[in-house]
Amino acid sequence: MAGNSFGTIFKVTTFGESHGEALGGIIDGCPAGLEVDLSLVQYDLDRRKPGQSAIVTQRKEPDEVKFLSGIFEGKTTGTSIGFIIENTNQKSHDYSHIKDSYRPSHADFTYDQKYGFRDYRGGGRSSARETASRVVAGAIAKQLLKNIKINAFVSSVGSLHLAKNHEELDLAVAETNAVRCPDSEMALKMENYIKDIRKQGDTIGGVVSCVIKNVPVGLGEPVFDKLHAELGKAMLSINAVKGFEYGSGFKGTEMKGSEHNDKFNTDGTTRTNYSGGIQGGISNGMDIYFRVAFKPVATLIQSYETIDKEGNIVKMQGKGRHDPCVVPRAVPIVEAMAALVLADNFLLNKVSKI
């Protein structure tokens, strides 16, 4: 199986399955001498872990990261950083009913067709639990980026949308509620809506928005490795993601060029930021902002039709512990993937100037 690594210089390779012994990863390319605050790494993992509120999966995992190499006396050594996160609360029997059947809109069918074999326990490698390793690597990348601030938040759940843009919001409020929405009134509406969806045995999608501040000018490698293209790939690699747009995005198609062009100030900043902090694939020093669309979780706790390995129509009902809406837990994952892209491009930019 290929496709387990991400990045060029700052590179992470992950391993492990949802119901295996452990998840983990190896980070290559992190410069030596970086002081690592391990509590900040664990903090981001705690933001992603299951069982943290009434509106997420109730699987109870401590998700404690253990570093095996590459960090000595609180600093990176320049060698590979190895880590593991043990699985402690697997309930593999919850998935025995799908051993010979395929869940609609899951990776069950495609994995079986591609490899001729699949780990049906929680989806194996296709499970979103794999993202825990990304969060660890992203937390290290954040510390390499120092002054660059990456803040993701939930901007919509179903048809409930934040009316304000990120410049009008106090993004710190997002971490004060279970939904991770920076508007307390809307967060309560979203939370109640998710709870109602869960009672119905159904699921709902949503959007995670992200704002990145203090990005230096010059990150991004044209022509094929444009910064927004790398961010797009990073986000689209996250489980359940169905869309990515940055800057003005699709709304920009409704504007005239005379309205959409970001006029310069004398210092090189721009009066507007429809470009989303990236022009020609290179960061221009303005805030980078983008939105990531997450589909409804495919596992439904209600009866539905599907097919088995022989192509027979069968009845199925989801079992086990699942998120009725993934976006609250996806916030730290979006931040992690953004940090990995920026860290890689930060190091690439240094190499290009040598």
Image (spheres, rainbow, N blue to C red):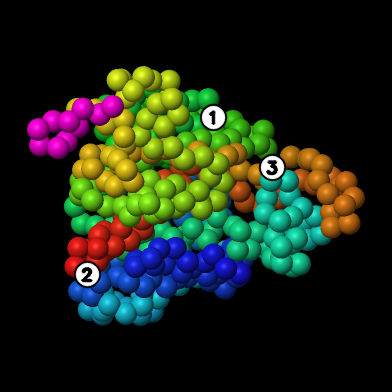
**234 sits to left or right of 342:** right
According to the picture, the residue beneath numbered tag 1 turns out to be 158
Q: Amino acid at mark 1?
A: Gly
Asked whether disc 2 touches disc 1, contact meaning CB atoms under 8 Å apart, the reply is no
On screen, residue 291 above or below 38: above
Q: Quadrant of residue 277?
A: top left
In the displayed structure, 272 sits above or below 286; it is: above
Task: Say what amino acid the circle numbered 3 marks.
Answer: Leu
At horizontal 43% and vertical 25% (from top left) the residue drawn is 253
Depth check, front residue: 56 or 255: 255
Residue at the disc numbered 2? 34
Give yes or no for residue 297 being in the magenta stretch: no
With 258 as the anchor, is 203 left or right in this view?
right
Which secondary structure is most common in the magenta stretch?
loop
Rounded to the nearest whole Å, what is the CA distance between mark 3 and mark 1? 16 Å
Q: Earlier in the sequence, mark 2 or mark 1?
A: 2
Pointer 2 local density, CA inside 10 Å: few below 14, some 14–19, many at least 20:
some
What residue span does the magenta drawing correspond to?
Answer: 261-270
Q: Amino acid at mark 2?
A: Leu
The residue identified by callout 3 is 300
Find residue 165 and report its horizontal and vertical position in percent.
33, 27
